[in-house]
Image (tube, rainbow, N blue to C red):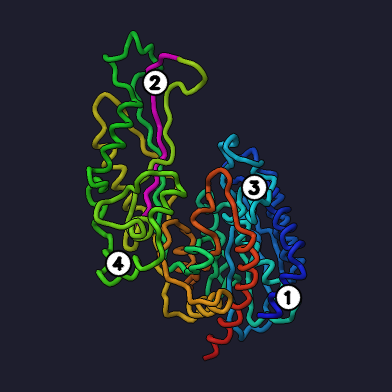
């Protein structure tokens, strides 16, 4: 630990400056206008892996954005860790809500503000620098492989093809991912599961053109109004999702499991203050911790239709659209939920509008085994670094590729994130605490050390 801390202290300015360089690339995978920047980011990541000491570094082309691969095999008989991350980021919009430019990282009050600071550039780059640390101090205890992709924020469409075509190349004993969060630095935690995802877009179409609301209003159905009513009907008065069959496969937690989950530190007043809300909201009969980690949800991610420009335009829109995501829990399947939603949404459409449902992407929920060698290694690493044993939690987000790795490579994943739920992921003013960044670089080598030692036992 002294060697690790000394290295981080001696190189802390460079470690931070390199992250800032990475954050300056506007690697937005969802918007084609950023294509060249995304490609430049992949090249930068590849170069930094080479600089850190990785062999066989390659920017692997796909039908979309490339996957950066690198490895260090010190002894084929030793265990191998496959580290996954992503270099693409969410769009920065709305730009006017950022206090400082999203792609000009700024340090304020010990926090790095930039798009991708936590999700996932700051977190995956910890692994690159931890690898550099182990190489420079001659303490790498096992083999390591890196797979850093550029399409996670748009569904990782081409990752499955790459994994299937490179099973031997990617052969490992565990996948290590830092794209999740902890409760806090005072209460370190390890996520033991993630929710799945079904993401789709709906369109409601009425008349064949936009109409004058004075001439036609009251006589022709307004698609925006109808869409709002249809969406509102998807929850009942207890905020229970009304799609028939939606809960059929949900695995309910036992009383003991619910009790253990709710023992995690949680201050509701602090939660509400942080979000500037008067009350929490959610499915009746469940706590906030249960709602955000162990219960399925349905949320509107965007809704639009008609005139939204400056001033007034009295128009009855021809169509209205919404983007909707459903977070899924163990035993639910994204394809089935997408089908149930499509059938239900189409069925509840009144005859005076036409409805179209377009699936975008999805992923399966996962639960990681807490008795595995890899999980115990992560526990020991965090306990050694933070001075206290991590609390097991369930993550509310989705990383669809975790299920892919298990299905195609036959290996489990350890979710050892260092972000915080308050880091404004996907929102303006995304941040990542500089303490968390350095703490990750200090903790990751300990994971490799304990994983190698426990694998021998």
Tag 4–tag 1 contact (CB < 8 Å): no
Disc 4 on helix, strand or loop? helix
Query: Where residue 170 sits: x, y (%)?
Result: 58, 70
Pointer 1 residue: 6
Query: Where residue 323 sits: x, y (%)?
Result: 42, 39
Query: Where residue 6 sits: x, y (%)?
Result: 73, 75
From the viewer's perspective, is the residue at label 4 or at label 1 nearer? 1
- The boundaries of the magenta stretch are 313-328
Pointer 3 residue: 27
Q: What residue appears at the point 58 percent right and 84 percent down from the top-left corner? A: 452
* Mark carried by residue 317: 2
Disc 3 on helix, strand or loop? loop
From the viewer's perspective, is the residue at label 4 or at label 3 nearer? 4
Disc 1 on helix, strand or loop? helix
Label whose residue precedes the other's in the sequence (3 or 2): 3
| Front residue of 431 and 136 | 431
| Gap in angstroms between the C-alphas marked 4 and 3 | 40 Å
Tag 4–tag 3 contact (CB < 8 Å): no
């Amino acid at each position: 630990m002294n060697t690790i801390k000394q290295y981080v202290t001696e190189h802390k300015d460079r470690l931070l400056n390199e992250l800032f360089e990475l954050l300056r690339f506007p690697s937005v995978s969802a918007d084609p206008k950023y294509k060249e920047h995304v490609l430049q980011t992949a090249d930068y990541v590849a170069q930094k892996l080479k600089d850190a000491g990785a062999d066989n570094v390659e920017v692997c082309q796909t039908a979309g954005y490339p996957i950066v691969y690198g490895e260090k095999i010190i002894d084929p008989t030793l265990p191998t860790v496959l580290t996954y991350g992503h270099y693409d980021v969410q769009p920065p919009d709305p730009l006017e809500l950022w206090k400082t430019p999203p792609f000009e990282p700024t340090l304020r009050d010990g926090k790095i503000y930039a798009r991708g600071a936590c999700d996932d550039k700051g977190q995956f780059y910890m692994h690159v620098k931890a690898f550099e640390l182990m190489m420079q101090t001659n303490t790498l205890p096992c083999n390591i492989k890196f797979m850093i992709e550029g399409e996670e924020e748009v569904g990782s469409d081409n990752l499955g093809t790459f994994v299937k075509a490179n099973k031997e190349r990617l052969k490992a004993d565990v996948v290590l991912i830092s794209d999740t969060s902890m409760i806090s630095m005072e209460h370190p935690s390890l996520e033991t599961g993630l929710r799945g995802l079904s993401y789709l877009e709906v369109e409601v179409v009425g008349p064949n053109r936009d109409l004058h609301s004075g001439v036609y209003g009251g006589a022709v159905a307004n698609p925006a109004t109808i869409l709002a009513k249809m969406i509102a009907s998807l929850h009942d008065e207890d905020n229970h999702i009304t799609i028939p069959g939606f809960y059929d496969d949900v695995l309910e937690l036992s009383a003991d499991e619910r009790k253990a989950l709710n023992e995690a530190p949680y201050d509701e007043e602090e939660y509400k203050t942080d979000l500037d809300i008067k009350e929490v909201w959610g499915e009746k009969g469940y706590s906030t911790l249960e709602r955000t980690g162990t219960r399925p949800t349905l949320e509107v991610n965007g809704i639009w239709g008609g005139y939204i420009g400056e001033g007034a335009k009295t128009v009855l829109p021809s169509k209205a659209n919404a983007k909707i995501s459903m977070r899924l829990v163990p035993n639910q399947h994204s394809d089935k939920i997408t089908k149930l939603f499509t059938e239900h949404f189409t069925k509840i459409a009144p005859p005076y509008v036409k409805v179209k449902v377009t699936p975008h992407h999805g992923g399966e929920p996962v639960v990681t085994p807490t008795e595995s060698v890899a999980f115990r290694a992560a526990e020991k690493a965090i306990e050694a670094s933070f001075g206290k044993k991590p609390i097991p939690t369930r993550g509310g987000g989705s990383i669809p590729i975790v299920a892919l790795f298990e299905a195609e490579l036959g290996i489990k994943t350890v979710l050892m994130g260092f972000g915080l739920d308050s880091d404004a992921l996907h929102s303006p003013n995304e941040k990542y605490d500089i303490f968390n960044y350095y703490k990750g670089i200090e903790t990751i080598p300990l994971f490799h050390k304990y994983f190698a030692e426990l694998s021998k036992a």
